[in-house]
Image (cartoon, rainbow, N blue to C red):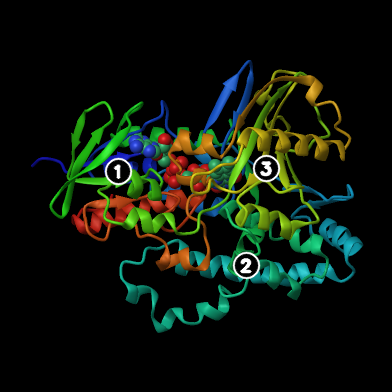
């Protein structure tokens, strides 16, 4: 009997994972990737002895990685050399004062009480809530598919409306735990990982600071790209074929089914089913026939974007921690600029990463590789903004912030700079509007409301990745790839390995 064949569009985390699961179930799987290597947004580059992760720099939710690698028949710890980062982040406020987020509760108590007397008790209550949100949300919303409305809208799920606090905005909810605006910011900035403002995010997301402190923030030796390498190796071993520099031009339709894809170079790949891992709004906009869905999707809420800098410097800055966040006192105005005006805030909050603190191989001896990420709005309709000018302003903002911690000479030690702006993100990975995290995670775009892992009309077209269920981030992309493969397995009555 001929093997069933599958084409996967895109070798992002979700695409490789889906491909590996399908190959392990006996399918003949080909992954077509427009770029010259796998990984998608989980990307890197090396130049003159400096190596930079250009996308993810934080391995969070390690329990999900463990679970998903196990489901691929592998042990995470055998594949990756993981080191826990503690303190996870150094937070720096506008007046130069600092807060180190650590799982050492005594140290947290001393620091918090110095900022706001009584706040440590608030932290413990907040973490308790985060613990409940994490386990409930993982079980009932994240680590699962919703194949029918009744699986979501049922009496069993009704208590989630109260227990997960989805109807309350995360930042507003912080008043139950802290008075200090700085502490409220310190335990909500993680929403930006979902590409979302804490002023719009559901309070459900207290699960993120909880998992970071309880389960840890980790760093795989070799950088985040080693996650891609491990997954690709698993997929190759399962028999997946990869084609790079292979850009899909359109998904071919025959009646109510898809029958394969056509590449921009004219090649045709026929298949019994297609899994699209390229970001979902782009797939509707560019790869599928125009039935109005692409237009409707473009009106959904998109996540923010970033201006990212990758700096090679001929000097080492050992005092610069691995993960530093500069949190602006005008936290609310920051998100207003990003989400409403779709631009760069006047005084942006930003993130600086110094990977050599974790892995000496990231820069030549005595030198540093530094990543700075400044969140900005995504591209608007017919975007008129001058991103070069905004990029230059963002660069000055980072240098200004570094000077508050005594680093004044970075610019004079620059060997080279590479930078990405929203148009770069759009062009490199086909992210509509340059939204780095795809569709955002507002209440109406979560759980059942997030686009499904299978097309509603073409039942042999599946979706895996950030803008489909369950959502954005590397761990969720791992889950998404599996959910898409499980859907295929059920539709085609495949056996499980
Ligand atoms: C700046 C930044 C920082 C981040 N930080 C973190 C972090 O610290 N921790 C974390 O967990 N997550 C982080 N994320 C999110 C995480 O990187 C993504 O959610 C995840 O990698 C998305 O995976 P995906 O499966 O959706 O695929 P994608 O990465 O979107 O990959 C899709 C692939 O499809 C390819 N493609 C697109 N169009 C076509 C076509 N027509 N033909 C062929 N191929 C095509 C693309 O080139 C790409 O390789 C970050 C993201 C960014 C951008």
Q: Quadrant of residue 329?
A: bottom right
Q: Quadrant of residue 261?
A: top left
Residue receiving disc 2: 131
Q: Callout 3: helix, strand or loop?
A: strand
Q: Is residue 202 left or right of residue 22?
A: right
Q: CA distance from mark 1 to mark 3?
A: 31 Å
Q: CA distance from mark 3 to mark 2?
A: 29 Å
Residue receiving disc 1: 287
Q: Is residue 137 left or right of residue 330?
A: left
Which marked residue is nearer to the observer: mark 3 or mark 2? 3
Q: Callout 2: helix, strand or loop?
A: helix
Please name whichever residue, 293 or 88, is drawn nearer the observer in this view of the structure. 293
Residue 260: percent from left, percent from top: 20, 41
Please name whichever residue, 388 or 453, is drawn nearer the observer in this view of the structure. 388
Q: Callout 1: helix, strand or loop?
A: helix
Write the residue at 29% across / 52% down.
462
Q: Few, some or many C-alpha atoms within 10 Å of disc 2 (few <14, some 14-19, many ≥20)? A: some
Q: Residue furthest top?
A: 48
| Disc 1 within 8 angstroms of ligand 1 (CB) | yes
- Compare marks 1 and 3 and give the one earlier in the sequence: 1
Write the residue at 44% across / 61% down.
143
Question: How many discs appear?
Answer: 3
Image disc number at residue 374? 3
- Compare marks 3 and 2 and give the one earlier in the sequence: 2
């Amino acid at each position: 009997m001929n093997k069933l064949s599958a084409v996967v569009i895109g070798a992002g985390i979700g695409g490789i994972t889906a491909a590996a699961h399908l190959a392990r179930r006996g399918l003949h799987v080909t992954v077509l990737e427009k770029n010259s290597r796998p990984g998608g947004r989980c990307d890197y580059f090396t130049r003159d002895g400096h190596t930079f992760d250009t996308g993810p720099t934080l391995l969070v939710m390690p329990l999900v990685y463990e679970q998903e690698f196990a489901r691929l028949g592998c042990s995470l710890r055998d594949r990756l050399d993981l080191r826990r980062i503690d303190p996870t982040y150094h937070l720096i406020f506008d007046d130069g004062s600092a807060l180190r987020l650590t799982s050492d509760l005594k140290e947290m108590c001393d620091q918090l009480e110095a900022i706001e007397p009584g706040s440590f008790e608030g932290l413990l209550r907040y973490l308790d809530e985060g613990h409940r949100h994490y386990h409930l949300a993982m079980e009932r919303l994240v680590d699962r598919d919703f194949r029918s409305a009744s699986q979501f809208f049922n009496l069993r799920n009704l208590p989630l409306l109260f227990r997960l606090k989805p109807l309350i905005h995360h930042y507003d909810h912080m008043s139950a735990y802290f008075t200090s605006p700085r502490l409220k910011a310190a335990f909500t900035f993680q929403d930006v990982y979902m590409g979302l403002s804490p002023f719009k995010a559901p309070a459900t997301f207290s699960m993120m600071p909880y998992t970071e402190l309880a389960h840890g923030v980790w760093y795989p030796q070799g950088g985040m790209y080693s996650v891609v390498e491990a997954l690709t190796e698993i997929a190759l071993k399962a028999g997946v074929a990869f084609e790079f520099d292979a850009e899909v031009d359109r998904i071919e339709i025959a009646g109510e089914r898809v029958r394969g894809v056509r590449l921009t170079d004219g090649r045709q790949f026929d298949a019994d089913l297609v899994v699209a891992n390229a970001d979902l709004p782009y797939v509707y906009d560019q790869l599928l026939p125009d039935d109005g869905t692409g237009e409707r999707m473009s009106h959904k809420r998109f996540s923010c974007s970033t201006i990212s800098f990758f700096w090679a410097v001929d000097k080492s800055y050992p005092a610069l921690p691995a993960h530093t966040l500069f949190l602006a006192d005008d936290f609310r105005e920051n998100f207003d600029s990003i989400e409403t005006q779709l631009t760069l805030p006047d005084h942006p909050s930003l993130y600086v990463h110094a990977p050599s603190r974790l892995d000496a191989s990231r820069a030549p001896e005595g030198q540093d590789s530094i990543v700075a990420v400044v969140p900005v709005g995504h591209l608007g309709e017919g975007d008129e903004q001058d991103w070069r000018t905004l990029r230059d302003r963002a660069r000055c903002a980072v240098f200004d912030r570094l000077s508050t911690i005594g680093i004044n000479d970075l610019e004079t030690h620059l060997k080279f700079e590479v930078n990405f702006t929203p148009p770069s993100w759009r062009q490199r990975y086909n992210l509509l509007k340059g939204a780095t995290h795809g569709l955002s995670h507002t209440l109406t775009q979560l759980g059942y409301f997030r686009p499904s892992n299978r097309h509603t009309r073409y039942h042999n077209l599946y979706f895996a990745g950030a803008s489909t269920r369950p959502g954005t981030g590397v761990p969720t992309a791992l889950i998404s790839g599996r959910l898409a493969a499980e859907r295929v397995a059920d539709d085609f009555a495949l056996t499980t390995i």
